[in-house]
Image: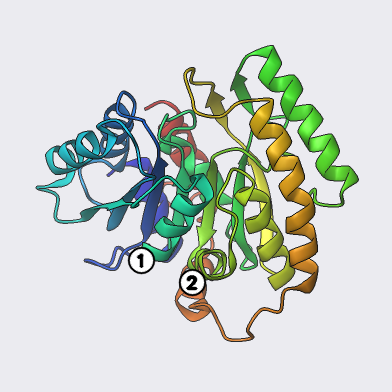
Amino acid sequence: MSPVTQLFVEMIGFQLPRDIALTIVIPMYCESARIGPTLEDIAQTLGGGDLAAEVVVVDDGSTDDTLAVAEAAGERLFGDQSMVDFVCKPQERNRGKGAAVRAGLEASRGDWVLMMDADNSARLRELPKLLEATGDGHTGMVVGSRSMPESEIEARVLRRVAGIAFRSAVQVMGMRFVTDSQCGFKLYRCDAAKLCSEYGVEDGFAFDLEHLGLCNKQGIGIKEVGIAWVHSPNGTVSVFSDGVRMLLRCFAIRDRLKRLVISSREFERDRAASMIEMKLPQSGDGVGAESVLSASAGS
């Protein structure tokens, strides 16, 4: 049993035969060279399909053969796994990462939904760190962070400096919900995923701030956890031009959130609560969270 699967089993007390515990959403745009290795790593980390899960890749109108590569890799890696579903959702045109993530969240069926980048900068083996933070019964969104003391980061100096400048500007605007809002490794409880897919409108890279703002407005607890993250070159994000666009969008997001009225209906909260009511095992109760994380880090 893989470390990720083991932690899920310990959280809920048992493994349901087909109830989907985890959805992994991967937005992709012109990622033909990287999506295959990323899916390989995910398949290996899931440990042969002993966790009821689904992998949802959303192609944001790529102009290369990203979609074909992802479909072929998904069939090869997950086609024979009865416990892991693979779903490929092509967008008709390039709308932006935010739109692709929203489509993935809307399609998700898991109790928990992990959004991760196609370049695998933060690997699936970091997920237990985020899961461990959900045991208080209140937290519905956990942000993988490159800015915490325990974070392990390999990145260029220019990117680090740009990140610090962006966080400072966001704080001045009163939009700093966490220290690192833009890291592409976030865990949503299913009600938080539904909230963001229904009320989110940001199509570009500023969607992270919008999702954090929506959860904050709805009273869904947010936590930030340090993770290991390795910068992957040749990405589609421009530090300067996209950074300026995101800052400009922050004003619009802030104003929209102030005016937004969210329906009082529950967002599948009953199903989500059934998982988070279970506490992580204490020391001496078999394989605890600490050993699970150690096993994951060594994989």
Question: Which quarter of the image is occupied by the C terminus?
Answer: top left
Can you say whether 275 is above or below 114 in the image?
below
Characterize the local packing of mark 1: few (<14), some (14-19) or many (20 or more) Cα atoms within 10 angstroms: many
Characterize the local packing of mark 2: few (<14), some (14-19) or many (20 or more) Cα atoms within 10 angstroms: many
Q: Nearer the viewer, residue 263 or 10?
A: 263
Q: Quadrant of residue 168?
A: top right
Question: Image check: 78 left or right of 200?
Answer: left
Can you say whether 289 is above or below 64 in the image?
below
Q: Nearer the viewer, residue 167 or 187?
A: 167
| Image spot of residue 98 (x, y percent) | 53, 50
Disc on the earlier residue, 2 or 1: 1
Seen from this angle, which residue lies furthest right?
Answer: 172
Q: Quadrant of residue 129?
A: top right
Whole-Å distance between the Cαs marked 2 and 1? 11 Å
Q: Which residue is mark 1?
A: 109
Element on which disc 2 rests: helix
| Image spot of residue 166 (x, y percent) | 77, 34
Q: Which residue is mark 2?
A: 272
Identify residue type, mark 2: Ala
Identify residue type, mark 1: Arg
Q: Residue at x 58, y 86 (%)?
A: 265
Element on which disc 1 rests: loop
Q: Is residue 283 visible?
A: no
| Image spot of residue 213 (x, y percent) | 71, 60
